[in-house]
Image (cartoon, grey):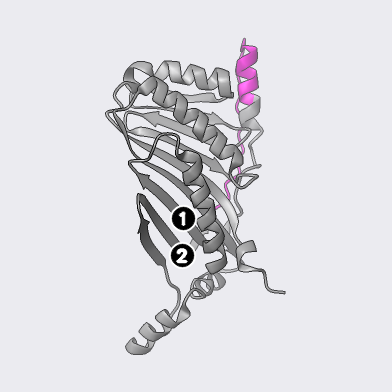
Amino acid sequence: MAIARDKRWNLLSLHFRHQYERGYRYLDRCGEFMVAMEEQFDFICQEALPTGAILSQPDLGLTLALDTNGLAMSQELPSDEGEQFLRNVVDATRLACKFVQPGAIFYSGFAAKHCHVCGTEDQALAASLEFHPAGAEALADKLGMTPKNQTVSCLLESGSYDLQVEFMPISFNSVIRETARNPGFHSTDSQRRRANRLNSLDESRNPPGGFAIGLNIDLREWNPPQNGLEAQFAELRKQLVVLREMF
């Protein structure tokens, strides 16, 4: 039995980006932001430098980065359709805007990356031709050749939204970490808990390796309104329903 097109896609990751204008107060207030994220939302500090800060919430596969240019967040292999991701994005952006006080938000962007794993390289290349195959076949006929695979990339716009859609064959590795973090001698309770939380992700969020077709959707809103992230994410989910069925 053939798999329904909208059911064959596995959600690999979700991504968010706030692009700042004049986010220079990051240099003065980064520490306060990081402490607030740890105390209020259970994030863990990964790196704190003048060039940028990185935090994670390993239990949910979340990674957050903040610098003078903006805030970015991603979630690997989300277990739902993005509800946890959206809640964390909203919380983090409110805190970041409180402390950094950027001059303006240039754009906000939500993206989703999908894959459909194929058995072999040839199957992945052939699957990429399933979307509007007539175009590739007409081009091949004109040139006296045979279509092998195709990549689709399209940028669409509506009002303040830009939607980037990409469909292509991909290959990737599944990396299994063989080392474990050790908190070291005389470590504090919080240091031991941090190491245990990070070690719990040894294999839980590794995507399968091999060949696949990929579907990436990136929705940006230019000069976004205040408190508009929920509406933008709802728009992304609406477009995902259509695109998963089309491809």
- Could you tell me which secondary element the residue under label 2 belongs to? strand
| Residue drawn 43% across the image and 60% down it | 165
- Could you tell me which secondary element the residue under label 1 belongs to? strand
| 136 relative to 90, above or below | below
Please name which of the two marks, 2 or 1, marks the residue nearer to the observer. Answer: 1
Q: Is residue 177 visible?
A: no
Amino acid type of disc 1? Ile
Query: Which residue corresponds to mark 2?
Result: 168
Most distant residue in the top direction: 186
Residue 46 in the image: state x and y as whole percent: 49, 26
| Residue drawn 37% across the image and 60% down it | 156
Question: Which numbered disc, 2 or 1, marks the residue that appears first in the sequence?
Answer: 2
| Residue drawn 60% across the image and 62% down it | 117
Q: How many marks?
A: 2
Q: Is residue 203 left or right of residue 103?
A: right
Q: Which residues are magenta?
A: 172-195
Q: Is residue 145 left or right of residue 190?
A: left
Q: Quadrant of residue 30?
A: top left
Residue 73 in the image: state x and y as whole percent: 47, 37
For residue 173: magenta?
yes
| 76 relative to 135, above or below | above
Query: Which residue corresponds to mark 1?
Result: 217
